[in-house]
């Protein structure tokens, strides 16, 4: 995250201990933390996914309709 875009919050060696790593930062889509975790073999989840799920939840709540999830997913992943 800005301004420290070259560091990760845990040691690279410890990433091998995790099966899943989530980073709430969504710009860039694949942060250094996620790149390192993926290299270590972890399943990674980007902050873009959190952003998308929040948008879907808000749409459902405020419109009382089902969000067009696939359309939203395409738009958001295309933009980020």
Image (cartoon, rainbow, N blue to C red):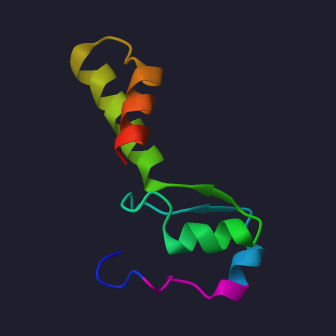
Whether residue 10 is in magenta: the answer is yes
Q: Quadrant of the N terminus?
A: bottom left
Toward the left, the furthest residue is 62
Q: Residue at x 62, y 88 (%)?
A: 11
Toward the top, the furthest residue is 65
Residue 47's spot in the image, x, y percent? 44, 54
Q: Residue at x 36, y 61 (%)?
A: 27
Q: Residue at x 50, y 55 (%)?
A: 46
Can you tell which quarter of the image residue 73 is in?
top left
Judged left or right of residue 60, residue 37 is right
Toward the front, the furthest residue is 78
Residue 62's spot in the image, x, y percent? 22, 21
Bounds of the magenta segment: 6-13
Judged left or right of residue 14, residue 8 is left
Instruction: Note whether 13 is above or below 56 in the view shown.
Output: below
Residue 71's spot in the image, x, y percent? 41, 22
Residue 49's spot in the image, x, y percent? 47, 45
Q: Residue at x 29, y 83 (%)?
A: 3
Give the mark count. 0
Q: Name the one closer to the observer, 17 or 80.
A: 80
* Secondary structure, magenta segment, majority class: loop
Instruction: Note whether 17 is above or below 19 in the view shown.
Output: below
Instruction: Note whether 40 is above or below 45 in the view shown.
Output: below
Can you tell which quarter of the image residue 60 is in?
top left
Whether residue 5 is in magenta: the answer is no
Q: Name the one closer to the observer, 57 or 74.
A: 74
């Amino acid at each position: 995250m800005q301004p420290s875009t070259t560091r990760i919050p845990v040691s690279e060696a410890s990433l091998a201990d995790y099966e899943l790593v989530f980073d709430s930062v969504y710009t860039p889509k694949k942060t250094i933390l996620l790149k390192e975790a993926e290299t270590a073999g972890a399943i990674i989840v980007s902050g873009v996914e959190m952003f998308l799920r929040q948008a879907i939840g808000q749409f459902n709540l405020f419109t009382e309709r089902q969000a067009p999830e696939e359309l939203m997913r395409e738009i958001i992943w295309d933009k980020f």
